[in-house]
Amino acid sequence: MTVIVRFAPSPTGYLHIGGARTALFNWLFARHHGGKFLLRIEDTDRERSTAAAVAAIIDGLTWLELDWDGEPVLQSKRIERHQAAAHQLLAAGKAYRCYCSPEELQAMRDAAKAAGRPVGYDGTWRDRDPALAPPGVAPVIRLKAPRSGETAVHDAVQGEVKTANEQLDDMVLLRADGTPTYMLSVVVDDHDMAITHVIRGVDHLTNTFRQIHLYRALGWSEPAFGHIPLIHGQDGAKLSKRHGALGLDAYRDRGYLPEAMRNYLLRLGWGHGDDETIDTAQAIAWFDLDGVGRSPGRFDKGKLDNLNAHYLRQADDRRLVALLGPRLAKRLGSAPAAPALERLRLGMPGLKARAKTLEELADNALVYVRSRPLPIEPKAKALLDDAACRRLRALSDSFAGLTDWRAGEIEAALRAYAEREGAKLGEIAQPLRAALTGSTVSPGIFEVMEVLGRDETLGRIAEASGAPGRGLPLGN
């Protein structure tokens, strides 16, 4: 048997963390078993479904690098097929027309609630002669669900779960206007797409009991089911925006790498011993539903940040330069020039070791890509008094004479100058940092100088120290 799974989001908003994890688990399950991962857009809610939301789902899955097999299926294109299935059941006596008005249905619910019975449809039209139907009323079509006994789900995650059939009413298959309901559309589409395993959130478990009734009424084999736990916040409450439940696009915009997000989502509800850092190839090799727990995963932004920092350190430097391009252009007002990007590539090993996100990395990368004259922060400017500028001009002459422009040689020249001046290293290094970076914080100053190169280093010192004929005076 070829494993075939699907991710079937409703395009009524952004692709959120829970949906992304469901997609990931399905994708990993398919890839682990050498099967297929299909994408179905459940867009039958025409009022709430939008083209922008469909685009956001496609964009999110593409960014997360979860490739699907074949073309996406739009559920809205299959309405006639859904309707045909309902009429098939009607012809077989396994469904019926219900003519109850909204007022009658509400009265049923109120009476059941008052009597302590399950709130639902009471089967008024289940066995009634359609000839008694009131004139001018468009009926819905309902499934004749079993009224006694129980239905069991042999769930790959939750174990065996049962419910009494009397708890489930005769669900609507087609509305009065002829449009199919979610429950009917899902079953028909899963059957027609030959889905072998339905992996989704545990909040769908009640739907599964109803859908099993529909599979059996249609004479179809039901797929295997696996209902994965929900994601909660650190406080144990259902995940919400206050916990960080943002759209996947927000995490991308905040500078998380897709491989870090995949690793983090994998660990929200699935485990393999004590392993925390699991690359995608290893995840495919290891993943199966027996590793999914039953307890809710807890979203922890700190863990996500630490994982992202790990993957930043592992990332190729040229790739990071390319990813930073748009972020740097936004900060600078224009795209950095090629020489600046080359400096950034050379300086990337030192930068990426100190950042947790691409946003942090972009902020730190400005030291290598800004054009002169550099903006200088107030705290840095305070270090550039007359005495410091005099020392910087003298130090610049020492640097200009170096034949080997490497961090070790640069440091040796600075130490020799400090010794001649009778000054502490920090008294010279801190103003030098301010002149070269415009800040009081940066990667190691000798590393920065080696990456900047001789000409850019001497140019920045000249401008910051007001060296005659070599740069611009210190700005306001």
Image: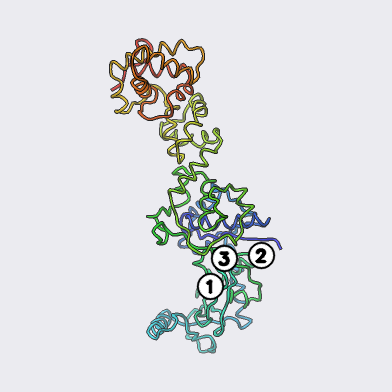
- For marks 1 and 2 on the same chain, the one whose residue lies earlier in the sequence: 1
Q: Residue at x 56, y 55 (%)?
A: 273
Disc 1 element: loop
Examine the rendered structure and indicate whether residue 420 appears above or below residue 182.
above
Q: Examine the image and state in which quarter residue 473 appears.
A: top left
Element under disc 2 = loop
Q: Residue at label 2?
A: 194
Q: Amino acid at mark 2?
A: Ala
- Give the spatial CA distance, label 3 vs label 2: 21 Å
In the picture shown, does residue 318 fall above or below 58?
A: above
Labels 1, 2: front one: 2
On the picture, is 278 further left or further right than 16? Answer: right
Q: Position of residue 165 (x, y in %)?
A: 53, 81
The residue singled out by tag 3 in the image is: 157
**Pick the front one: 333 or 236:** 236
Nearer-the-camera pick, 409 or 89? 409
Q: Label 1 vs label 2: CA separation?
A: 25 Å
Dot 3, how many residues are within 10 Å of its Cα: few (below 14), some (14-19), or many (20+)?
some
Single out the mark in the foreground, 3 or 2: 3
Of the image marks 3 and 2, the number of the one nearer the N terminus: 3
Residue most extreme to the right: 1
